[in-house]
Amino acid sequence: MARNELRPVIKLKSTAGTGYTYVTRKNRRSDPDRLTLRKYDPIIRRHVPFKEER
């Protein structure tokens, strides 16, 4: 059974420039634009915005 394309896997990359990434899934219907989440970056030990990469 194929993965549902309504919930694709996306990479979230740190805006702090550390190169740290998170991998998650998102719902294309509720979030059609690029996602930005505030998450923890363990390299600089702070919460920073993470933006969606394609």
Image (cartoon, rainbow, N blue to C red):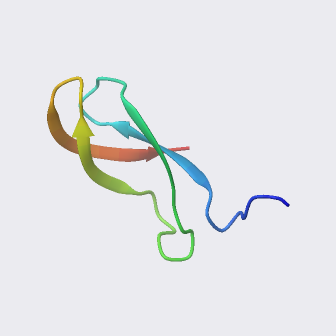
Residue that appears at 28% across and 25% down = 17
Quarter the N terminus occupies = bottom right
x, y percent for residue 11: 49, 42
Which quadrant would residue 36 be assigned to in this image? bottom left
12 over 29 or under it: above or below? above
Quadrant where the image shows the C terminus: top right
List x then y, in percent, for residue 52.
Answer: 44, 48
- In the rendered image, the residue lying farthest to the bottom is 30
Q: Residue furthest right?
A: 1
Tell me which corner region of the image, top left, top right, bottom left or bottom right, holds residue 45: top left
Q: Which residue lies furthest to the front in this view?
A: 1
Residue 31 sits above or below residue 39 on the image:
below
Q: Position of residue 16 (x, y in %)?
A: 23, 31
Q: Is residue 41 left or right of residue 46?
A: right
Is 45 on the left or on the right of 32, as rendered? Answer: left
Q: Is residue 51 above or below residue 18?
A: below
Q: Residue at x 72, y 64 (%)?
A: 4
Give percent across and percent down for residue 44. Answer: 17, 25
